[in-house]
Image (cartoon, rainbow, N blue to C red):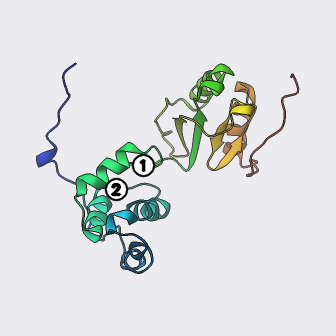
Amino acid sequence: MPWITKNSGSATIETRDEPYLTAEMTKKLREDYIPRYAKPKGALFAALHMIQHHYGWVPKQAMKEIAEVLDIAPSEVLDTVTFYEEYWEHSKGENLISVCRSIACEFCSATACTEAIKDKLGIDVGQTTEDGKFTLVELECIGSCGTAPAALINEDLHENLTPERTVQLIEQVQNGTYQPGGTGAVKEDL
């Protein structure tokens, strides 16, 4: 299979006048994080988390700014962002739905839960609804194999899901009755 190439050498980065990495963030990196590591590059994860928690994603301009502060190549920052699933290269919906696709969850019908979400929201995995309310992703494992299938709604773990229960949770988020905290109830049909 041939490599698919793109002209990244002359690619342009969409920028804004105001930096994403604010003076306060830069100060925190330089004073609190970088000194903890043998090399400034060690603070890369902290810098990426800082940006993502503030903006909800990691814009390319921010990657370049981080590279400058840490004195590393921008490509190293981009490689990190594109390697780890936890980082976002584009904005995501107000609510992130993450369905586990580990073997345990797959065996216990996680695919049916994902399909129910796709049908309910009219989006595919990796997409965001037109109103910006929901983004659907799949994760390799969320560590709930004993209570599969499992999913996260934002940061709330929901276990022992069924397609019907999954749709109910989405409807609760849509109508404002969702109670954060997750569920861990045992299936009644065991």
x 41%, y 81%: residue:
31
Q: Which mark is residue 14?
A: none
Query: Mark 2 packing: few (<14 Cα in 10 Å), some, or many (20+)?
Result: many
Query: Mark 1 packing: few (<14 Cα in 10 Å), some, or many (20+)?
Result: some
Between 72 and 130, which is closer to the camera in this rendering?
72
Q: CA distance from mark 2 to mark 1?
A: 8 Å
Q: Does residue 21 lie above or below 125 as drawn?
A: below
Q: Which mark is residue 59?
A: 2
Image-quadrant location for residue 149 = top right
Looking at the rendered structure, the secondary structure element under dot 2 is loop
Looking at the rendered structure, the secondary structure element under dot 1 is loop
> Residue 2, image x and y in percent?
18, 22
158 vs 116, left or right, is right
Furthest-front residue in this view: 38
Image-quadrant location for residue 168 = top right
x 16%, y 44%: residue:
8
> Residue 71, image x and y in percent?
24, 67
x 42%, y 49%: residue:
88
Mark toward the start of the polypeptide (2 vs 1): 2
> Residue 150, image x and y in percent?
68, 34
110 vs 17, left or right, is right
x 31%, y 65%: residue:
66
Quadrant where the N terminus is found in the figure: top left
Between 64 and 125, which is closer to the camera in this rendering?
64
171 vs 127, left or right, is right
Q: Does residue 30 lie above or below 43 as drawn?
A: below
Quadrant where the C terminus is found in the figure: top right
Q: Which mark is residue 88?
A: 1
Which residue type does callout 1 highlight? Trp
